[in-house]
Image (spheres, rainbow, N blue to C red):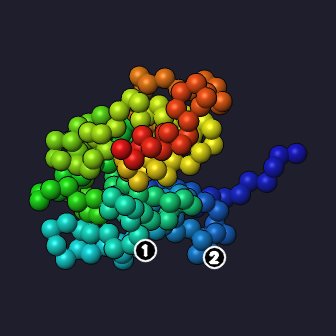
Amino acid sequence: MRPKYTPRTRCICRGCGQEFFTKASKVKKGWANFCSFTCPGRDAGRFWARVDKSGECWLWTGCTDGHGYGYFYAQRRLRRAHNFAWEIENGPIPDGFEVCHNCPDGDNPTCVRITHLWLGTHAQNMKDRHQKGGYEAITTLTAEIVYAARLCRANGEPLTAFVEKFGWTIYPAVRGDSWKHVPFPTLQHECDTDLTCGEQKDVARR
């Protein structure tokens, strides 16, 4: 016996403008405004309500990290504000690319204005930040520090000391997204043959 066919109704997403099809019963109940739960347009109004557009840079007024980058909860997870702003206007960020700043008066991490953002690889982003005199992590991070941080993570130790010194860029290095030439620790008890966890934190604070 063939399954009963449920007619589908053509709809236009109020968030991203994409066409999608859904059950007629959902349209009747007013549940067909967005194409999916992960559509950036679902949270666009809430997002822009927290942006100050009075100046050249459009400044995020919500929560920020230690370097001034904004954070916004959307799509069921915590997102960086300038990344989310890019996705509202341009769709998903392609794999291997990051959203970078190019503000006229110098890069402003709290800026979410689309015309002040551009796509680049991680290497391009780091080079651009270094040329513009970005925060200290670009010039002070070394292979020894990266290995010590990875070793600390392998032993279940928090990376608090590294984050305080080098900022959030330590996390891509620990994951291997950057500093790929630095080997990963092979054994969890490798501390006794290299740096102890306490010594690792001392390295980070130098």
Q: Is residue 186 left or right of residue 108?
A: right
- Which residue is painted at 34% across and 74% down in the image? 61
Work out whether residue 200 or residue 49 is closer to the camera in this orientation and state it.
200
- Which residue is painted at 52% across and 32% down in the image? 195
- Where's residue 151, x and y in %? 55, 34
Work out whether residue 62 or residue 84 is closer to the camera in this orientation and state it.
62
Residue picked out by circle 2 = 29
Question: What amino acid is at disc 2?
Answer: Lys
- Quarter of the rendering containing residue 41: bottom left
Disc number placed over residue 15 in the picture, else none:
none
Q: Relative to 149, does residue 162 appear above or below in the rendering?
A: below
- Where's residue 175, x and y in %? 50, 36
Q: Is residue 13 left or right of residue 69?
A: right
Q: Relative to 28, does residue 142 appear above or below in the rendering?
A: above
Asked if one can make out residue 14 in the rendered structure from this viewpoint, the answer is no
Report helix, strand or loop for mark 2. Answer: helix
- Which residue is painted at 41% across and 22% down in the image? 181
Q: Residues within 10 Å of mark 2 (few under 14, many from 20)?
A: few
Residue picked out by circle 1 = 46
Q: Residues within 10 Å of mark 1 (few under 14, many from 20)?
A: few
Confirm or deny contact between disc 2 and disc 1 (CB under 8 A).
no
- Which residue is painted at 29% across and 63% down in the image? 110
Asked if one can make out residue 21 in the rendered structure from this viewpoint, the answer is yes
- Where's residue 63, x and y in %? 41, 70
Question: What amino acid is at disc 1?
Answer: Arg
